[in-house]
Amino acid sequence: MKVLAVGGGGRENAAVEAFHRGGAEVFAVMKNANPGIIARSSKYKLMDEKDVEGVVAFAKECGVDLAFIGPEAPLEVGLSDALQAAGIKCASPTKSAARIETSKSFMRELVNKYSIAGNLEYASFDNAKDCEEYLRTIDHEIVVKPVGLTGGKGVKVQGEHLLSFEDTMAYVNEIFENNIGGAGVIIEEKAVGEEFTQMVFCDGKRIVPMPLVQDHKRAYEGDVGPNTGGMGSYSDCNHLLPFITSGERQAAIDIIQKVIDAMAKEGCPYHGVLYGQFMLTAKGPKIIEFNARFGDPEAMNVLSILKTNFQDVCMMMADGCLKDNIRFEYKATVCKYVVPKGYGVKSEVGKEISFDTEGIEKSGAVVYYANIDEKDGKLVTMSSRSAGIVGIGYYLEEAERNCEAALEFVKSDWIFVRHDIGKKELVQKRVDHMNGLRSA
Ligand code: AMP
Ligand code: GLY
């Protein structure tokens, strides 16, 4: 089968690797020359992934049977719709279905309209004055978000980034003045608990859940610093996480199923991977956001242990005939992103980085390249995350150890890693935090 893979990050490298493992012939379009994707592609083109006409022309020229779109930006401009109009099956949502991610107010309104559990108090605004009036009337803690897409970096949380009313209004004004996200401001109730990611495969009606993953959004060890696209993530051998019960997980799966039902009723059936990000609170899981795609880094955790042929899963999602016998290995994974120094504030760009892939593999890990480029035959950093190292093992401790051993084979003076991710101490902190909330 000939597959088009769109996107050049770690998530897409993991998807391409899974396609390759299943025997698919890969054709790729991406902005940057991702060496992992290039190595597995029969043909690739470096281009703007939002250039819908250009991508469709390349897909037709390569004669692909199926397309898989990694990032959200091409979904927002309707790449799936255009590929399908050209007769190419697509395992990613249409523009209209992708609103579950691209418009945070669409998502909250949908959940409200269908009385789905897990919603938070929210209000959206198209001007700062109304927003200020609202903020003066409420007495719970809040989170400020641009309504539109900001690459996971637009959220500011009261008590963490926003320490006073003035801080909050300054950020609200900044969003409007600079038109961040392009669609106004949403104020949400702040949920307190432990975050987790439940991703599912979806065929418009049915869902098949993937193993749970926990991401780490903060740039620095100990969960401090600016929010990032995600510094690393882990999954456990039983497909749960150490701080969540299977009943709590089931509550999240039920929420996702109801969202999928609602989207079908709204005339925008959802085909593709859906990412549910939840805060597990003392009152169960609350919806933080949905993404119309795999999470990045979370994709690297789950695709590394996917046993079922990935292109078959994608075909079933596109065709609306998903079977529930999709299997993952019962193994733990720990992914740590190697990022350029300064990432989250101002990255060191164009700095040399090298990988001893044999050493990484011998350590029981895999490398997925991400926002990396090639210059004069050498790999160099770009402004975003450079590469994900995924350690795999029968237990979390083993997966974490393998990841750390593999990191020794990544060389550069210009990178940093959150070594605390997946370590016993941090995982235990999460368990204690959740137990404390439950017993309060
Ligand atoms: P998002 O881009 O929506 O994933 O938000 C980035 C991060 O901000 C999340 O991973 C959470 O840690 C935090 N966050 C977003 N919304 C909320 C909320 N309503 N309550 C508490 N934390 C939130
Ligand atoms: N890991 C968070 C995201 O992909 O949005």
Image: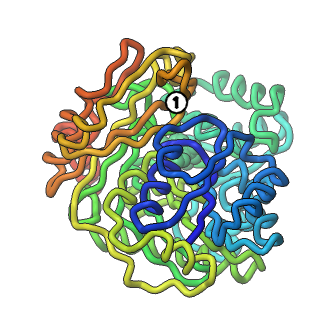
Q: In this view, does 260 lie to the left or right of 363?
A: right
The answer to which quarter of the image holds residue 4 is: bottom right
**SS class of the residue under badge 1?**
strand
Residue at image x 59%, y 67%? 2
Q: In this view, does 122 lie above or below 402?
A: below
Circle 1 residues within 10 Å: few <14, some 14–19, many ≥20: many
Q: Is residue 50 above or below residue 276?
A: above
Residue at image x 53%, y 44%? 38
Image x and y of residue 225, in percent: 45, 24
Residue 138 can be seen, yes or no: yes
Q: In this view, does 284 lie to the left or right of 398?
A: right
Question: What's the colour scheme?
Answer: rainbow
**Towards the viewer: 29 or 246:** 29
Ligand 2 within 8 Å, label 1 CB: no
**Towards the viewer: 186 or 256:** 256
The answer to which quarter of the image holds residue 176 is: top right
Q: How many marks?
A: 1
Q: Name the residue under label 1.
A: 372
Image x and y of residue 271, in percent: 63, 73
Residue at image x 64%, y 65%? 67
> The disc labelled 1 sits on which kind of residue?
Ile
The answer to which quarter of the image holds residue 309 is: bottom left
Q: In this view, does 9 lie to the left or right of 154?
A: left
**Towards the viewer: 373 or 262:** 373
Image x and y of residue 93, in percent: 68, 66
On the rendered image, what quadrant is the N terminus found in? bottom right
Residue at image x 31%, y 69%? 328
Residue 111 can be seen, yes or no: no
